Image (cartoon, coloured by chain):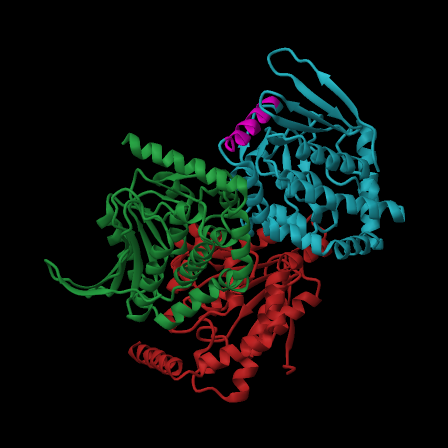
Chain colours: A red, B green, C cyan
Amino acid sequence: MMRSKVFSLVARAGSNRMMSTATKLTTVEVNDKTGIATLTMNRAPVNGLNLELLQDLKSSIDEIEGNKSRGLILTSSSSTIFSAGLDILEMYKPDKDRIRAFWTQLQDTWLALYGSSVPTAAAINGHSPAGGCLLATSCEYRVMVPNFTIGLNETQLGIVAPQWFMASFLSVLPQRDAERALNQGRMFTTEEALKVGLIDETANNKEEAIEKCVAFIGTFAKVNPLARSLTKQQFRAADLQQLQNGRKEDLEKFLFFVNQPAVQKGLGIYLEGLKKKAKKQ
Amino acid sequence: MMRSKVFSLVARAGSNRMMSTATKLTTVEVNDKTGIATLTMNRAPVNGLNLELLQDLKSSIDEIEGNKSRGLILTSSSSTIFSAGLDILEMYKPDKDRIRAFWTQLQDTWLALYGSSVPTAAAINGHSPAGGCLLATSCEYRVMVPNFTIGLNETQLGIVAPQWFMASFLSVLPQRDAERALNQGRMFTTEEALKVGLIDETANNKEEAIEKCVAFIGTFAKVNPLARSLTKQQFRAADLQQLQNGRKEDLEKFLFFVNQPAVQKGLGIYLEGLKKKAKKQ
Amino acid sequence: MMRSKVFSLVARAGSNRMMSTATKLTTVEVNDKTGIATLTMNRAPVNGLNLELLQDLKSSIDEIEGNKSRGLILTSSSSTIFSAGLDILEMYKPDKDRIRAFWTQLQDTWLALYGSSVPTAAAINGHSPAGGCLLATSCEYRVMVPNFTIGLNETQLGIVAPQWFMASFLSVLPQRDAERALNQGRMFTTEEALKVGLIDETANNKEEAIEKCVAFIGTFAKVNPLARSLTKQQFRAADLQQLQNGRKEDLEKFLFFVNQPAVQKGLGIYLEGLKKKAKKQ
């Protein structure tokens, strides 16, 4: 499972030097002035969460945990998509072994991000449906660029967001709003997301979004990092334990559901739609 | 437990035909244009929730689950009372067997409504205290006509709303507001209920309330019904399981409490008050 | 553990007589007109919660439970500090037996206050960090005088607020706000606390704060006290049981953490800072 990495020391105009680590599908840049790591998803065209992107995300989170970064900012190299969510191709007519590895990796990546010991923030610089919204709501803070949408729209795709997607959503939204949005599969515009509390701030562009994430992480400047990390993990312990204690059942539930003929048919129709859309453009 | 039913096909002025099913105390009308079922409580004068009304409610919910309705709208045939809540006569000097059947039926009816697979909305066209508020907050959406009141006012009556009443209340209100209102036995006016989030919209009259419920149910038009239903039930699973796993204890707790001399005395005084009030009118 | 008490019947100007009970570090005054008890913390200079103040608080709460008071108002005899929280001297280079008694007493006092059968309100007439905020958020209502601060700032001190501190905090604040404030160790000004819901009202001074607490307790005038008390305890049962079932583990976790060299060092530095500050004045 080890993936080759490219290490490079990047000299930038201005006063900040960055230490940059790139795997195939993610890049980690640590600003040596602020000590904050930016984790960028680079899987063109839409950061579809396939097995490899999830693996790279997990190893990048681990790297940031290990390199004493003061915080983690999650963002996208695309100018229109933060992440389009789970890659449908992993679920449509799946290979038996690969789909198990895929879902298990998704669990691992969520456990690492939601339970991360460092402060986490998402600079949401594009659309963020389904799994994209899961990543964003697993962070502690969200800044979003206008004219995009965010939400757990699984019911619109004929699938069910698992219990731990709901936990991330509920860490951000009141119960009534969370349940209704989940049932509707509602996508919120940037403005709607701000109003309901699904995001914390808006920013005019990616750079400003990252600056605001940096400012949020700066609110922990006088806080003891170990005490902060133990506090966060204690606060999120029930959510994390629920998945940790039920990983196998969660996997089997997913496999059973995704292999239903009606679900496979729905995914097929959805993929046909995407192909036609692509041809037209 | 089977109750006789009257089936009738009702032709209505205008374009919509309704399929109507009436039990003694409830009516189900399915609009064949929208596919949405309206479930009306008809127990004069105040829709007091006695054993028979609870049975009819349960069988009407089951019917709506079974007839592929696109949604359920709960309302009242009274012009001033949605439901006055549990019928005190079931609890005052109770028959030993009947009170067990009564409470067990209340549990069953709540499990069916709160866990319903179809979208649910309440058109609250009158006062809605105690058990009336339980029914309303077990739905996913609430539209209320002005100049009425709603709330869990059990403490004002000297009784205790069980844990699952609290679960319904907490699915709608923030924890701080829910606890305070429960402790106070607070009745909210329509305007206050809107402000705190206990209802979602107001409407000038019953027809408009039903229209707004129809519009809410319409937000699920593009949603896969199976995925929606599984999502809702997963979201409400902990609340539902808590009662399912503790039904016997919940029944015994209720019986113990209701049979306390102080509680019986309180209910007696309350009934005296109702009788005097009725005579004056 | 029994502490000597001074009972005195105090005649006051005006129409109200007060029955007053003073232990060494707390005073209970019951207004015989309203039937409401005011519980005042008197440990100069900052109401640091040491073993003895916690014991006196617990015995005063028990007294109020027993004397049929209509409510409990918690306040401070200081004009600038409600309570500065846990007394650091109990935790720095601790005596092995005393620190066990201290933490066990803190658990007992919280269980008594958070689970109190009478209506509780805090008249917050001074700063209220850490354990001071715990006491305030364990009450059902909070009125605060301007120009002070309140919050669970444990992470700023390098320590971790235990799970039951979080439960009190979450009984008042939404999950997102609660987690962020805990991680930041954020202290809220009176105005910020009002905005986020951490307090319910502001008052110009202590007397007005107490009057507003009296008015809150008055909202229960028509409520059956037994039904109210059972309702509150059922609502808070999960939080209370979590500590009751895990008291020993909670104690051992605290002892392990507080005895870490890094934590002891941090507490030492903090105490040095307090001493220097005191000398300057």
Judging depth in this view, the residue of B205 and B10 nearest the camera is B10
Quadrant housing residue A70:
bottom right
Magenta residues span C207-221
Residue A150 at least partly seen: no
Instruction: Tell me if residue B227 comes above or below residue B102 in the rendering.
Output: below
Which percent across, then down, holds residue A175?
47, 55
Q: Main secondary structure of the magenta part?
A: helix
Q: Quadrant of residue C37?
A: top right
How many numbered callouts?
A: 0
Quarter of the rendering occupied by the N terminus of chain C: top right
Is C220 colored magenta in this rendering?
Answer: yes
Task: Residue B227: give x, y in percent of width and height.
Answer: 40, 71
Magenta stretch contains residue C14: no
User: The C terminus of chain C appears in which quarter of the rendering?
Assistant: top right
Which residue is most to the top?
A: C13
Q: Is residue C15 visible?
A: yes
Q: Nearer the viewer, residue B111 or A42?
A: B111
Relative image position of residue C166 (x, y in whole percent): 64, 50
Classify A202 as above or below A94: above
Which x, y percent locates residue A1?
64, 83
Q: Is residue A80 left or right of residue A108?
A: left
**Vertical relation: C17 (above or below) B105:** above
Relative depth, front residue between B243 and A280: B243
Q: Residue at x 34, y 55 (%)?
A: B53
